[in-house]
Amino acid sequence: MQLKLYQIDAFTSQLFSGNPAAVCPLKDKWLAESLMQNIALENNLAETAFYIFHDNEYFIRWFTPTMEVDLCGHATLAAAHVLFFHEGLHTDEVHFHSKSGVLSVCREGDFLTLDFPADTISQVKLTNELRKCFDILPHQIYKGKTDYMFVYENEEQIKNIHFDLQSIEKISARGIIITAKGNEVDFVSRFFAPQSGVPEDPVTGSAHTTLIPYWNSVLQKDSYTAKQLSNRGGFLYCQFLNSRIKISGQAKTYLTGEINI
């Protein structure tokens, strides 16, 4: 069996930056879960997105090299890019049904905007387990649905921090977001999830469902600029809409091809 495969750099205007995601369009039914997991492992990217078109609706699932996840922003952006720019979708909006509800992506020129549910976060205490993850202690820690979020004093700490992947891997969460106010953007972040097969993610759309509600409470704005300070880096334009958030960015196609299974 031959399947189409695309590799898309998401949240960037140029190749070799942003966050690469594989996108595998299917027809009207899923492959076996074990097969989708093996394809994601073979791709060896942070996420591989699979989508189907069934009963006039799109459905999407996301796999890291080691597990299926409930929500992924950059691979959703990549899947929408594939539909808009390669698979002949002639509308300016697509709705994906997922484990996290209906996720919409709108197209305006080269920019794509995700409409995601906002996370609910609560402040928690620093435990001995969390203390071991980084060499700099945060001044606040929050817990969302899937991730911890460490808040730091400034951008330089986010850039220069040393991390212990073995300690991060032991915590009971998808991963840890670290964030601080930005020098040239509203806020910066990084994301570590070795327990999900992603030591450091280049750009994490889903993490911004946690970041945006927090920074809205601090900065009291409706719109935000954000940068993820990974080696590849990525830029995001964000809006806070109470129970929903919008995350906008561009994407570039790196690869189009076929896989044989």
Image (cartoon, rainbow, N blue to C red):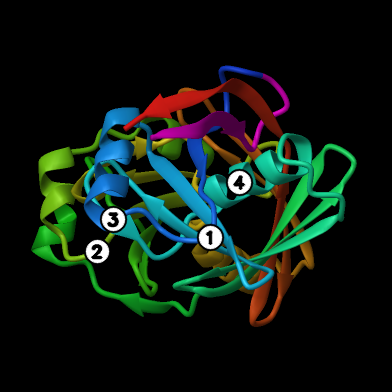
Q: Is residue 168 above or below residue 146?
A: above
SS at circle 1: loop
- Badge 2 amino acid: Ala
Residue 191: percent from left, percent from top: 39, 45
CA distance for labels 3 and 4? 20 Å
Which one is nearer the viewer's eye here, 140 or 109? 109
Give me the residue at 34% from left, 37% from top. 200
The residue identified by callout 1 is: 28
The residue identified by callout 2 is: 173
Residue segment shown in magenta: 1-14
- Badge 1 amino acid: Asp
Q: Residues within 10 Å of mark 1 (few under 14, many from 20)?
A: some
Which one is nearer the viewer's eye here, 4 or 175? 4
Between label 4 and label 1, give the one nearer the viewer. 1
Can residue 229 be seen? yes
The residue identified by callout 4 is: 79
Q: Is residue 184 above or below residue 125?
A: above
Q: Inspect the magenta stretch and tell me whether residue 4 lies in it.
A: yes
SS at circle 2: loop
- Badge 3 amino acid: Ala
CA distance for labels 2 and 3? 26 Å
Q: Quadrant of residue 249?
A: top right
Residue 18: percent from left, percent from top: 57, 30
The residue identified by callout 3 is: 32
Residue 145: percent from left, percent from top: 38, 74
